[in-house]
Image (cartoon, helix red, strand yellow):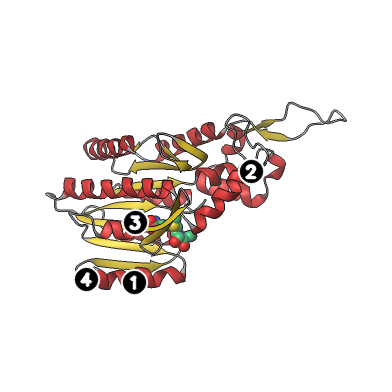
C-alpha cells in the first residue's frame, strides 16, 4: 500500500501514480462529465447569440483527435471528443479553430474537414499558449464571440495565456484545471521542490505567492535541534481555493470549480480528485457575463 500524501483526505501515492498513467492513455468518468458540460454550453451559447450579429468561434486549444478512449468500470469505449462535439453543436458556430501540439493527432483533426464539409475549420499545429496568444491579439473581438476549451493533461496553461484571453473581453472559457498536477508539483516537503516544479507552479498560477500561502516553517526540529525546512500546510482544498481566488482576480466572472474524481459519479465520487472544472467569462459587461454564468452554473449543478 502507498503512503499517505495528505492525512486529511487519505490520498495514496499509488492512486496518484495510477491515475496519471490512466489519464494519458484512457480517460474515465471525468472525461464524460467535462465533455457533457462543454457540449451543453456550446448549444446554449449559440442559441443565446443566434439573434446577434457576432461571428461565433469555437477554439479547442488541446484538441486531441476528435475521439476519446475511456475506461469506465473496466470497460473500454471510444466516445466523441470535444472537437466533434463542437462540430455537431446546433445551432452551429461559424468557425472552428483546433490547436494541437502532437503531429500524430493532426491527421485525424485535418480529416474532420472532409467529414464536415460545410464547416470552416482551421487546424493549427502549435503549443496552445503560443497559438492562443497570437489568436487573442489578431481577432476582431468587437465583432466576434468565442468559446474556448482548455483541456490539458497537466500543468500546461500559462497564466500569461489566461491574461491574454481575459483581455479580449469576448471569450468564454471552460478550463479543466489540473488539480492532481498542482498537488503533485507542490510537494508536501519543500525540500522536494526543485527549480522546475517551482517554475511550473509560478507559470500556471501567475505568481510566486503560492510559496508563502502553501508552505510554512516546519515546527518540528531535527535530532540536533535544527530546522527541518518548510512543509506544505495547506491541504488540497485550500490549494484549490487559492486557484479560484487567482482566477476570480483575473476574469470578470468565474464559477466555483467542479471537482472531478478518478472514479464514481460526481454525486458519489471515488479515488483521487484529478481535475477541477471551471467556467470563466471574459466579457466585462454584467448582462453578458450574468447570462453566461447562469447557464454555466446550471450545467455544473446538473453534473
Ligand atoms: C486531454 S487531451 C484533449 C482531449 C480533447 N479535448 C478531447 O476531448 O478529445 C490533451 C491534448 O493536448 C495535446 N497537447 C499536449 N500539450 C500540448 C500543448 N502544449 N499545446 C497544445 N496541445 C497539447 C495532447 O497531445 C492531447 O491531444
Describe the element under mark 1 as helix, strand or loop: helix
The numbered disc on residue 13 is 2
Towards the viewer: 99 or 158: 99
**Above or below: residue 121 compared with residue 245:** below
Which numbered disc, 2 or 1, marks the residue closer to the eye? 2
Residue 179 screen position, x and y as percent: 50, 43
| Residue ID for mark 3 | 82
Label 2 sits on a secondary structure element that is helix
- Residue drawn at x 36%, y 36% as measured from the top left: 255
- Residue 4 is marked as none
Residue found at the far right of this picture: 224
Label 4 to label 1, Cα distance in Å? 12 Å
Q: Which residue is mark 4?
A: 117
Horizontally, residue 48 falls left or right of residue 240, namely: left
Q: Is residue 187 visible?
A: yes
Label 4–label 3 contact, CB within 8 A? no
**Residue at disc 3, secondary structure:** helix
Q: Which residue is mark 1?
A: 110
Q: Residue at x 35, y 50 (%)?
A: 35
Q: CA distance from mark 2 to mark 4?
A: 47 Å
Q: Is residue 29 left or right of residue 122?
A: right
Mark 4 nearby-residue class (10 Å; few <14, some 14–19, many ≥20): few
Amino acid at each position: 500500500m502507498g503512503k499517505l500524501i495528505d492525512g486529511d483526505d487519505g490520498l495514496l501515492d499509488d492512486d496518484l501514480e495510477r491515475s496519471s498513467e490512466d489519464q494519458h492513455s484512457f480517460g474515465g468518468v471525468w472525461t464524460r462529465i467535462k465533455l457533457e458540460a462543454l457540449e451543453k454550453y456550446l448549444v446554449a451559447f449559440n442559441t443565446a447569440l443566434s439573434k446577434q450579429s457576432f461571428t461565433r468561434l469555437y477554439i479547442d486549444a488541446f484538441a486531441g483527435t476528435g475521439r476519446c478512449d475511456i475506461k469506465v468500470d473496466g470497460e473500454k469505449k471510444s466516445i466523441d471528443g470535444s472537437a466533434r462535439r463542437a462540430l455537431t453543436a446546433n445551432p452551429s458556430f461559424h468557425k472552428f479553430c483546433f490547436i494541437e501540439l502532437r503531429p500524430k493527432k493532426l491527421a485525424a483533426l485535418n480529416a474532420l474537414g472532409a467529414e464536415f464539409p460545410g464547416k470552416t475549420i482551421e487546424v493549427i499545429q502549435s503549443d496552445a499558449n503560443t497559438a492562443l496568444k497570437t489568436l487573442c491579439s489578431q481577432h476582431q473581438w468587437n465583432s466576434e464571440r468565442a468559446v474556448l476549451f482548455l483541456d490539458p493533461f497537466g500543468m500546461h496553461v500559462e497564466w500569461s495565456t489566461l491574461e491574454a484571453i481575459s483581455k479580449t473581453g469576448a471569450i468564454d472559457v471552460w478550463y479543466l484545471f489540473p488539480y492532481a498536477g498542482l498537488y503533485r508539483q507542490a510537494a508536501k516537503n519543500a525540500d522536494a521542490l526543485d527549480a522546475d516544479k517551482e517554475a511550473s507552479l509560478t507559470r500556471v498560477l501567475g505568481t510566486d505567492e503560492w510559496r508563502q500561502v502553501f508552505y510554512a516553517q516546519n515546527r518540528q526540529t531535527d535530532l540536533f535541534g535544527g530546522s527541518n525546512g518548510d512543509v506544505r500546510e495547506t491541504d488540497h482544498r485550500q490549494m484549490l481555493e487559492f486557484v479560484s481566488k487567482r482566477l476570480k482576480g483575473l476574469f470578470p466572472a468565474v464559477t466555483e470549480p467542479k471537482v472531478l474524481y478518478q472514479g464514481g459519479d460526481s454525486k458519489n465520487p471515488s479515488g483521487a480528485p484529478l481535475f477541477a472544472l471551471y467556467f470563466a467569462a471574459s466579457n466585462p459587461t454584467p448582462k453578458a457575463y450574468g447570462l453566461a454564468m447562469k447557464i454555466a452554473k446550471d450545467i455544473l449543478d446538473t453534473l
